[in-house]
Each structure stands twice: as structure tokens, then as C-alpha cells.
Image (tube, rainbow, N blue to C red):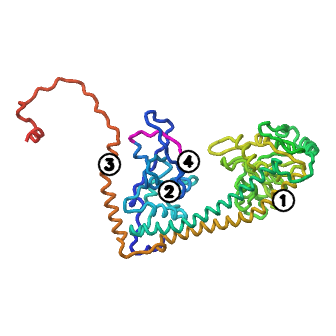
């Protein structure tokens, strides 16, 4: 952070606050323990705690205080978006899961100051050096305690928080309006797509008939796909169909394809030679389009190039991903240059007369997403949809001229909505940059005025250390009281030994002290 302002010091977080991890979920519920609501990682967002979706777990009474959050406690995400944090502002206490750190600041540290500093540290990457794990990142408790925190005087902490909240509240209000505008555009696009692919919004006054088209499609599929299983089932399940406009027909996706094929599982690498062929992977499918900004390659002579080389109009379907992203699709265009595709994708090559972009619009619509969600399977944290289930997806088929007219309407609307959408995204990006600048100003001592009369932070730190030390005996006593006591083992009954002295004469030192 550079040189600190005069009167500030740097201290580790563990010197300024008590930290504790929440309760690990038990596979077996404790029968005698009552069920308690608890907070998870997902409930803790930046600056707020969402209590609309709470789970329950059993917590014995003697563990409740240990795994509870009280008003003023700061909760910090141990995984996921590392460092994401918020303060529990409610009067009632609540339990919390092990995926969260509870940070209980000592009385001379303002909790909201620490909350904003952790956001600043997360935004600038200052927390990255304290994170462990190569694939799944974690912030261990000991590492959290070692995070350095710039500590100003107590009065200045309060001034910084006040100045931050005044400026950030205005910024947040503008961000809310921008985000609402962005979402409105996305909702309008979704609704329009839904109306067009369902036939509620006819895009042409001419009423044709898809039967002639489908006869040609069937002939092509029979010739090129032969007796492939996915090509034989033409009618979708009735539960997925609804009334279509005159001349439209329902068909399964597979019955419209002359070929359905999995991609290459060969190991890809960065480009090494001019003839290397790009491999489109699941991450390249973004919002119904192919984003070729991040590519890996195969050598041009690789054995898989010929069988996985893409053609203009091929639809690529993402068969494995997270539950939110599995089943997304995009259409390849020959304008993108030669390319092949990876094994987590499925290529669908349609018969002539079927517009790939039309099918792509159906797959990525709310209707398509609902179908995919109904057939998805979960394996080791990944969602999967195989080619057989994908081939049964219901597709409404208009005559080809109406497919093209509908696609033009969708593209025109998308272009019209793209301008305000882009403006909103640019403004949101600037908003993030401005927020980072405000936080940087706060923790470099430039946002709030400094007062030479404030108690210096080194004195404050010494007082916090004294408070921490004085709290140790109380914590030990509290833990000891919460520990279940072991009952003494019953001794076999024996006759009492005969006294070695008269009752009036104490026979041991202890007795003598007691009787004095």
C-alpha cells in the first residue's frame, strides 16, 4: 500500500479481532440437538446478508455459542469469491457454516472499517497471497489472521467509514439504475425470442406449410444418417408440445440432423505453428455465440482434424458444464476460419432447409433451457446431457422462409437493444473502477481528514492488545463450562477404614488448616 499516513500503523487481522470458522455439516443429524437456521457462503454477499434462502442443521446447545453470529460480527467467505464479507446487523443470533469465517472485532476497531478494507484487499489482489489451493481456492483461518491491516486512529476510522458510505451510497444508487436498464434489455430480448419461436408473434403475413420442407429433410436424413437411432424418432413427447401456428410442425432435433458427432478428446496446446488448427471448447460458447478470444490448438496433421472439422452452419452443443451453463449452444460460421471442436461439445449438422440459427434460438430460449433441465444428470459436480437426450429436444419448425424472416426480426431487435446494453455495461465497468478508486483513497488516508489530536494508532494497538489478553481467561472459562463433564467412575464399596485419631484431633495438615 505504500507509506502509511502519520499516526497509522500496520497490524495483522488476528491482532485486531477474534476469528473462528463455523460448524462443519454432519452427515448424521444429532437426534437430541434442535435444528437451527444457519448462514452459508452463498448468503454472504458484498455488504449484505441474504436471509431469504436459509437451511437448517442440528447444533447441540453446548455448541450454539461457539457457532453463532451476533450483531456486529463480520462474516468472511472462506471459499468461492475469497474475502467477500458482510456484517450481521440483526439483533437475533444465527448459526453459520464452516465455509465462513466469523470475525469479531475488539472494541477499538470499527467493524465496518474492516469490512471495507477486506473489499479493497480483494479488489486489488492483496488477499491472493494468503489463498491456498490450485483449483479450488480457500482462505484458511490462520492465513486470514495474518492479513495485514492499515490501522488509523479510532476517530479517523469512523470518519473514513462515514465518508466511504456517503460516496459509495451515491455510486450504488447509480449502479442499481444501470443494472436495472441492462436487465430490462435482457428481459425484452428473452420475451421477444419466446414470442417468435412459439409463433405468438408472426413475422410474416404469408402462411406456408412446413410439410414440404420436412419431406425433403426426411429424405436427406434417411440418406445420410441412415438408421441412426437419433434420426428415427420424429415426434417429441406430448408434454413438451403446444399448439403452433398454421403450417408449423413439431419435430425432434435429431430428426432434423444428418449428423450428430462428439468432438476430439486430444490434448490441446497454445499455437506453435501457422498451420495449427483452433479447437473450440465449451468456454468459447457465450450467450448463444462463439467467442474465439481464448483458443487452444491441434497440429494440422493430427488424426482428429478430418473427422471433427467444422462446416458452415454446424451447431455446437455444450454437453458438460455447470448446471447453469450445460446445454448452451452456438453456430459456427466459415467466416471464423477453419476450426475443430473438443469432446465436451456435440456437433449437430442439419439437413438443408433447416436454419441452424433458428434451432440455436430455440435451444437457448427459456423453453430450451427447461427441456435441458429436465434431462440433465449430475456427475462429480458437473451436469451432463448426452446426445440421445439432446436429440429428443422438441423443435417447432416453420417453413424455411418464415424461419429466415423470424431470424431477421430477432437480429434487428437484438441490434436495437445492443446499443443501450453496451452503454450500460461500459458505465457499470466505470462504476467498478470508481469504487476501487474511492476505496484506494480511503485506505491511503486521502478520503477523510486527519486530526493530530487523535490518539495515535500505536497507542490504540497497545490498548487492543491489552483487551485481547484480558479476554483470554474469560474465553478459557467459557470453553471449559461448555465442555461436557465426565462422570467419575463408581468405586467398589468397601468398609470405611478405622480412624487413626480421635475426631477431636485433626490428623492431617489439611484438616489442621480447616480447623484453624
> How far apart in space, not on screen, are marks 1 and 4 (Cα)?
48 Å
Q: Which mark is residue 334?
A: 1
> How far apart in space, not on screen, are marks 3 and 4 (Cα)?
36 Å
Query: In the drawing, does residue 164 fall left or right of residue 483?
Result: right
> How far apart in space, not on screen, are marks 2 and 4 (Cα)?
16 Å
Q: Is residue 61 rendered magenta in the image? A: yes
Query: In the drawing, does residue 42 fall left or right of residue 212?
Result: left
Question: Can residue 343 be seen?
Answer: no
Marks 3, 2: nearer the viewer: 2
The one nearer the camera, 359 or 307, is 359
Give above or below for 512 relative to 50.
above
- Secondary structure under badge 2? strand
Marks 2, 4: nearer the viewer: 4
The one nearer the camera, 172 or 300, is 172
Q: Is residue 131 rendered magenta in the image? A: no
* Residue 435 place in picture, x, y as percent: 56, 67
What residue is disc 2 on? Answer: 86
Q: Are marks 1 and 4 in contact (CB under 8 Å)?
A: no
Amino acid at each position: 500500500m505504500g507509506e502509511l499516513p502519520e499516526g497509522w500503523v500496520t497490524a495483522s487481522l488476528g491482532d485486531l479481532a477474534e476469528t473462528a470458522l463455523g460448524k462443519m455439516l454432519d452427515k448424521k443429524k444429532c437426534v437430541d440437538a434442535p435444528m437451527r437456521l444457519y448462514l452459508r457462503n452463498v448468503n454472504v454477499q458484498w455488504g449484505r446478508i441474504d436471509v431469504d434462502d436459509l437451511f437448517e442443521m442440528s447444533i447441540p446447545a453446548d455448541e450454539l455459542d461457539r457457532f453463532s453470529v451476533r450483531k456486529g460480527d463480520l462474516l468472511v467467505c472462506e471459499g468461492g469469491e475469497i474475502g467477500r464479507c458482510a456484517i450481521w446487523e440483526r439483533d437475533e443470533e444465527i448459526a453459520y457454516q464452516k465455509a465462513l469465517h466469523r470475525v469479531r472485532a475488539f472494541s477499538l476497531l470499527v467493524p465496518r472499517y474492516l469490512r471495507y478494507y477486506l473489499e479493497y484487499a480483494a479488489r486489488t489482489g492483496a488477499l491472493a497471497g494468503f489463498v491456498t489451493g490450485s483449483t479450488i481456492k480457500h482462505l484458511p483461518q490462520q492465513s486470514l489472521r495474518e492479513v495485514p491491516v492499515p490501522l488509523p486512529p479510532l476517530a479517523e476510522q469512523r470518519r473514513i467509514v462515514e465518508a466511504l458510505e456517503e460516496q459509495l451510497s451515491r455510486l450504488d444508487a447509480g449502479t442499481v439504475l444501470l443494472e436495472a436498464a441492462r436487465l430490462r434489455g435482457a428481459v425484452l430480448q428473452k420475451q421477444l425470442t419466446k414470442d417468435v419461436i412459439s409463433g405468438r408473434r408472426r413475422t410474416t403475413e404469408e402462411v406456408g406449410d412446413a410439410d414440404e420442407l420436412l419431406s425433403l429433410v426426411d429424405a436427406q436424413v434417411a440418406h445420410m444418417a441412415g438408421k441412426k437411432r437419433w434420426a428415427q424418432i420424429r415426434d417429441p413427447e406430448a408434454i413438451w408440445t403446444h399448439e403452433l401456428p398454421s403450417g408449423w410442425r413439431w419435430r425432434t432435433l435429431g430428426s432434423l440432423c444428418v449428423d450428430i458427432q462428439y468432438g476430439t478428446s486430444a490434448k490441446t496446446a497454445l499455437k506453435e505453428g501457422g498451420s495449427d488448427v483452433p479447437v473450440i471448447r465449451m468456454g468459447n460458447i457465450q450467450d448463444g455465440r462463439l467467442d474465439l478470444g481464448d483458443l487452444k490448438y491441434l497440429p494440422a496433421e493430427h488424426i482428429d482434424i478430418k473427422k471433427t472439422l467444422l462446416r458452415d452452419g454446424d451447431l455446437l452443443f455444450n454437453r458438460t458444464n455447470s448446471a447453469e451453463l450445460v446445454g448452451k449452444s452456438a453456430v459456427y460460421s466459415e467466416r471464423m476460419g477453419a476450426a475443430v471442436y473438443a469432446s465436451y461439445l456435440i456437433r449437430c449438422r442439419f439437413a438443408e432447409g433447416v436454419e441452424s440459427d433458428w434451432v440455436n434460438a430455440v435451444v437457448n430460449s427459456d423453453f430450451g433451457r427447461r427441456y435441458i433441465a429436465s434431462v440433465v444428470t449430475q456427475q462429480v459436480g458437473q451436469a451432463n446431457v448426452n446426445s440421445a437426450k439432446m436429440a429428443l429436444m422438441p423443435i417447432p419448425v416453420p417453413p424455411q422462409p418464415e424461419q429466415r424472416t423470424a431470424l431477421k426480426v430477432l437480429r434487428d431487435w437484438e441490434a436495437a437493444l445492443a446499443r443501450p446494453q453496451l452503454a450500460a455495461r461500459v458505465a457499470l465497468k466505470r462504476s467498478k473502477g470508481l469504487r476501487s478508486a474511492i476505496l484506494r483513497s480511503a485506505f491511503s488516508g486521502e478520503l477523510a481528514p486527519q486530526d493530530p489530536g487523535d490518539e495515535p494508532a500505536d497507542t490504540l494497538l497497545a490498548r487492543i492488545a491489552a483487551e485481547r489478553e484480558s479476554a483470554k481467561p474469560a474465553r478459557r472459562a467459557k470453553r471449559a463450562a461448555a465442555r461436557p463433564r465426565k462422570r467419575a467412575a463408581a468405586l467398589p464399596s468397601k468398609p470405611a477404614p478405622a480412624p487413626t485419631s480421635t475426631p477431636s484431633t485433626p490428623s492431617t495438615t489439611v484438616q489442621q488448616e480447616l480447623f484453624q
